[in-house]
Amino acid sequence: FEESRDLGQSFNRLVDQVQGEQRSQQDFLANVSHDLKTPLTSIQGYSQAIVDGAAPDTVKAAQIIYDEAARLNRMVTELTDLARLQAGRLSMNISALDMGQLTEAIGGRLSIVAGEKNVTLTLKTAPMPAIAGDGDRLAQVLTNLLSNAIKFTPPGGTVTARTFVQNSGVVVEISDTGVGISPEQLPRIFERFYQVDKARGPQRGTGLGLAITQEIVQAHGGTISVTSPGEGKGSTFTVWLPSPQMSTVMRRRT
Ligand code: ADP
């Protein structure tokens, strides 16, 4: 009797889980359709206006078409990446990497962007124990997190990247003094297409960056988490990656 009740409970749990997955799959498809349709509608509208001779400024209309097409292109590339990552089919080019050095390199590249926006970018990095990873993919992770931090920090603010050793692995911590994330939004931030402020305009993101970032980190056996004291109080993203070197050392010791 006990057993059949346990079985019943695990069956119900399984049904809940499957239904949950189906729902998020449906939400996802609805989001993809909507997000792909928006730029297409705009492209259609502006090109029709040019054809009809109804566009007051054809160069401007062409620029909008160009920007929207570029955004569509970005979305399709990101979706393809995400699908491959989730299917575990994205081939990884693994080598020994120093996350301190990589953070320094990516941070250096983005310091111009930060400077233009009058955001101070501080790098507190040091050489780290090697991790086994795909350099291009992890560069993408750091680029996503640092660009977001700069993007969501108003002029006069600060973005800080730190690297340190923790739990047989290496941590890269990126914190900013920017707009922050409310407690309700925090759990949803890594969802595909999730954007707190769906602002319009060609520079707007796709909401796929953090979903991809999380997939890449997990594909490396790592974890990513986010904390924020609340809206207007900045955010901190923490990436942890296991270091095979250190776990070998630990195993040898015990
Ligand atoms: P995108 O940046 O393309 O909109 P992401 O997946 O990178 O998509 O981010 C999803 C959402 O998470 C952003 O739209 C933003 O609302 C929020 N977010 C990400 N990084 C930060 C940050 N450093 N500070 C505040 N909000 C952030």
Image (spheres, grey):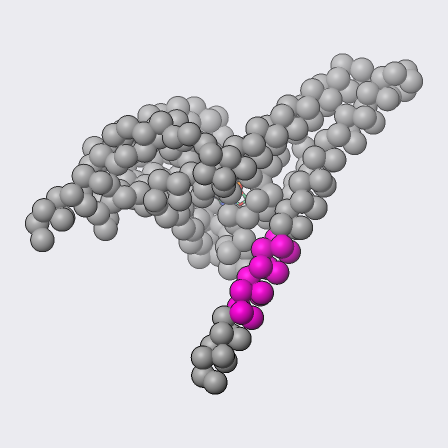
User: Is 216 on the left or on the right of 16, as rendered?
Assistant: left
Residue 14 forms part of the magenta stretch: yes
In percent of width and height, residue 93 lies at 35, 27
Q: Residue at x 33, y 25 (%)?
A: 105
Q: Give the range drawn in magenta.
A: 11-24
Depicted 178 relative to depicted 19: above or below: above
User: Is 35 on the left or on the right of 251, as rendered?
Assistant: right
User: Is 157 on the left or on the right of 40, as rendered?
Assistant: left
In percent of width and height, residue 40 lies at 75, 30
In percent of width and height, residue 4 lies at 49, 79
Q: Which residue is drawn at 9% across and 53% down?
A: 254
The prevailing secondary structure element of the residues shown in magenta is: helix
Q: Can residue 158 be seen in this view?
A: no
The one nearer the camera, 247 or 127, is 247
Q: Can residue 159 be seen in this view?
A: yes
Residue 1 forms part of the magenta stretch: no
The one nearer the camera, 91 or 41, is 91
Q: Give the farthest residue toward the bottom.
A: 1
Q: Residue at x 50, y 55 (%)?
A: 186
In percent of width and height, residue 166 lies at 23, 48
* Residue 139, image quadrant: top left
The one nearer the camera, 9 or 169, is 9
Q: Which residue is drawn at 39% across and 27% down?
A: 136
* Residue 156, image quadrant: top left
Depicted 6 relative to depicted 210: above or below: below
Q: How many marks?
A: 0
User: Is 119 on the left or on the right of 74, as rendered?
Assistant: left
